[in-house]
Amino acid sequence: MPTCQNCESFVTERYVKVFEPEGITSPRACPHCEDLVRRGKTVRPKKN
């Protein structure tokens, strides 16, 4: 089962396939992350 590198939450294999480049098995950020968000193909800190 893939897990997020940032918050260690479970993510589906489909999520990894859609949001990460080929060859990456664990996403850098996920919808459960409280401090990071996705912006296109990059990950950035959330704005408060």
Image: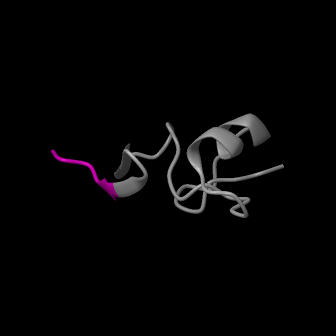
**In the displayed structure, would residue 3 be above or below residue 30?**
below
Q: Residue at x 38, y 56 (%)?
A: 43
- Describe the colour scheme in one phrase: one colour
- Which residue appears at 39% of the width and 56% of the height? 42
Residue at 76% from the left image edge and 51% from the top image edge: 2
Towards the viewer: 10 or 43 = 43
- Place of residue 45 in the rendered image (x, y in percent of width and height, measured from the top left): 28, 56
Extreme-front residue of the structure: 22
Residue 37 position in % (x across, y down): 36, 46
Q: Position of residue 36 (x, y in %)?
A: 37, 52
Q: Residue at x 61, y 56 (%)?
A: 21
* Residue 17 drawn above or below residue 43: above
Say which quadrant the C terminus sits in: top left
Q: Is residue 10 visible?
A: no
Whether residue 2 sits left or right of residue 18 in the image: it is: right
Judge left or right: residue 7 versus residue 9: left
Q: Which residues are magenta?
A: 44-48
The verdict on residue 5 being magenta is no
Instruction: Judge whether 31 appears above or below 29 on screen.
Output: above
Task: Report x, y in % for residue 40.
Answer: 38, 45
